[in-house]
Amino acid sequence: MSTPGTRTVVAGVDGSPASQAAVAWAVRMAERRGAPLLLLRVFEASMYDVRLGGGYDIGVLSEVYQAASEQLESTAAAVRKSTPGLTVETRIVDGDARYLLADATREADVLVLGSRG
């Protein structure tokens, strides 16, 4: 349950060990603040440009997106199980991680990221 006037704690999630450590830190911070937690996964489709002439292989994109989504939901399920009173939301956005993570701070008190990922 969030405290009135408290904004969200956002954690960038990519499945890396550093990302998982960041999620654990963000969970503790959200608990202390009485704030909801948003687990944010940035999916940058341009990283999966598989043809020399540009364009994307839809099959590859679909598989990678599905794997990212499953990993994000698995992380959220683990957080919900270990911290049942915490409001946990997930979101996947497509684009450049630098800008989208910075943009997430508009709705957050804190943005938590791993050191590598």
Image (cartoon, rainbow, N blue to C red):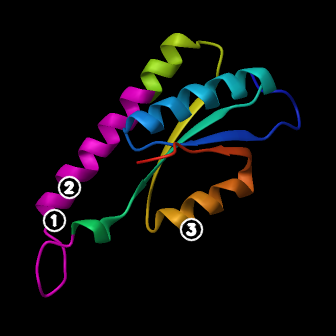
Mark 3 touching mark 2, by CB under 8 A? no
Above or below, 59 against 81 in this view is below
Callout 3, which amino acid? Tyr
Q: Which of marks 3 and 2 is nearer the N terminus?
A: 2
Secondary structure found at label 1: helix
Instruction: Give how far apart the Cα atoms at labels 3 and 2 are.
Output: 23 Å
Q: Using a 10 Å C-alpha cutoff, classify the residue at mark 3 as few (fewer than 14 neighbours), some (14 to 19) or many (20 or more).
A: few
Q: Position of residue 68 (x, y in %)?
A: 31, 44
Mark seen at residue 106: none
Q: What's the residue at 16%, 65% (across, down)?
A: 58
Which of the two discs, 1 and 3, labels the residue nearer the N terminus?
1
| Residue 54 located within the stretch drawn in magenta | yes
Structural distance between the alpha carbons of marks 1 and 3 = 24 Å
| Span shown in magenta | 49-75
Look at the numbered disc 2 and give the secondary structure of its residue.
helix
Looking at the picture, which amino acid does disc 2 mark? Ser
Which residue is at a point 22% across and 66% down the rendered structure image?
A: 48
Q: Position of residue 28 (x, y in %)?
A: 67, 22
**Side of 61 relative to 17 (left or right):** left
Could you classify mark 1 by the number of other residues whose Cα lies within 10 Å: few (under 14), some (14-19), or many (20 or more)?
few
Q: Are marks 1 and 2 in contact (CB under 8 Å)?
A: yes
The residue pinned by badge 2 equals: 62
Q: Which label was assigned to residue 58?
A: 1
Which residue is label 3 attached to?
A: 99
Q: For this rendering, which residue is in front, 15 or 4?
A: 15
Q: In which quarter of the image is residue 49?
A: bottom left
Which residue sits furthest front? 115
